[in-house]
Image (cartoon, grey):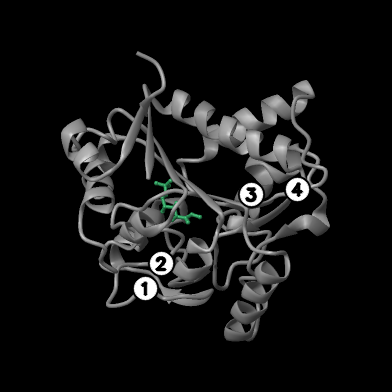
Amino acid sequence: MKIIQAKDYQEMSRVAANIVSAQMILFPGSVLGLATGDTPIGMYRQLIEWYRKGDLDFGKARTVNLDEYVGLSTEHEQSYNWFMRQHLFSQVNLLPHNIFMPNGLAEDTAAECVRYEANIRAMGGIDLQVLGIGHNGHIGFNEPGPVFTKNTHVVTLSERTLAANSRFFDSGERMPRQAITMGMGTIMQAKRIVLLCAGESKAEILSRAVLGDIDPMVPASILQLHTDVTIVADQAALGRMSMDELSANGVEVVTERE
Ligand code: F6R
């Protein structure tokens, strides 16, 4: 595991965008695993800027997203499909047939999970997976629980996640209680993983994920077992881990700028 320490959110976003664009320049046909949420928005903004300058080409890339709410159509402004179109897809030259997201309106959600998983496998797996981390340690919507669930599956969202995300829904509107998410096996099979983390409020969970036991109650802790994980985090998010603890745990830290 490697940590790149960025000064602030902006620098974290630029470093993460650099990692994604290096992947696309070296391997234009890459399968990119993408995340929604507040954290990667700056990275998407940077990628769009480089695309507009002509420095980046999404023409051959394929994307798969981590998750989608059950019951929301792609036209619902809180659907992750909408989010991705807003923050990336509509602004770069990704081809529509190369964009894959779980269908939140599938009548048979279990079959949709099987289809989604099989599609990722058929593409040869994910080359670079971008992740955020929830305050409870979730990645994708793999919530804390007794086991790590392997494949794409339907989850019931935890109270903490509902509370964190309910602010995005209109008052009176019922927030979806379930989501389809890639499983931990799907994520762990990605060839490379880059996890973005910003802000003091994430410092404690990030430290438990990086230095704590590998525990399904802290889903992100399983990333300790992956051989190619880079965490790009700002100083605030790294505030609960000392350099000594990190090096004692075999974590290499790169400081982006002194
Ligand atoms: C989103 C996702 C989630 C978020 C996490 C952090 O596709 O998979 O795991 O990455 O909830 O969200 P933010 O970035 O809003 O703090």
- Nearest to viewer (mark 4 / mark 2): 4
Label located before the other in sequence (3 or 1): 3
Q: Which image quadrant: the C terminus?
A: top left
Identify the disc placed on residue 93. none
Residue type for callout 2: Asn
- Nearest to viewer (mark 4 / mark 3): 4
Q: Name the residue under label 1.
A: 148
- Nearest to viewer (mark 3 / mark 1): 1
Give the CA distance from mark 4 to mark 2: 26 Å
Residue type for callout 3: Met
Q: Are marks 3 and 2 in contact (CB under 8 Å)?
A: no
Identify the residue at horizontal 61%, vertical 31% (top origin).
45
**Secondary structure of residue under mark 1:** loop
Label located before the other in sequence (4 or 3): 4
Identify the residue at horizontal 65%, vertical 73% (top origin).
116
Identify the residue at horizontal 73%, vertical 43% (top origin).
27
**From the viewer's perspective, is residue 224 above or below residue 51?**
below
User: Nearest the camera: 75 or 18?
Assistant: 18
Q: Where is residue 43 in the image (x, y as percent from the top left)?
A: 55, 34
**Secondary structure of residue under mark 4:** loop
**Secondary structure of residue under mark 3:** helix
Q: Quadrant of residue 203?
A: top left
Left or right position of 7 against 39: left
Q: Are marks 3 and 1 in contact (CB under 8 Å)?
A: no
Identify the residue at horizontal 45%, vertical 29% (top origin).
12
Q: Where is residue 173 in the image (x, y as percent from the top left)?
A: 47, 64
Q: Where is residue 235 in the image (x, y as percent from the top left)?
A: 30, 28
Q: Are marks 1 and 2 in contact (CB under 8 Å)?
A: yes
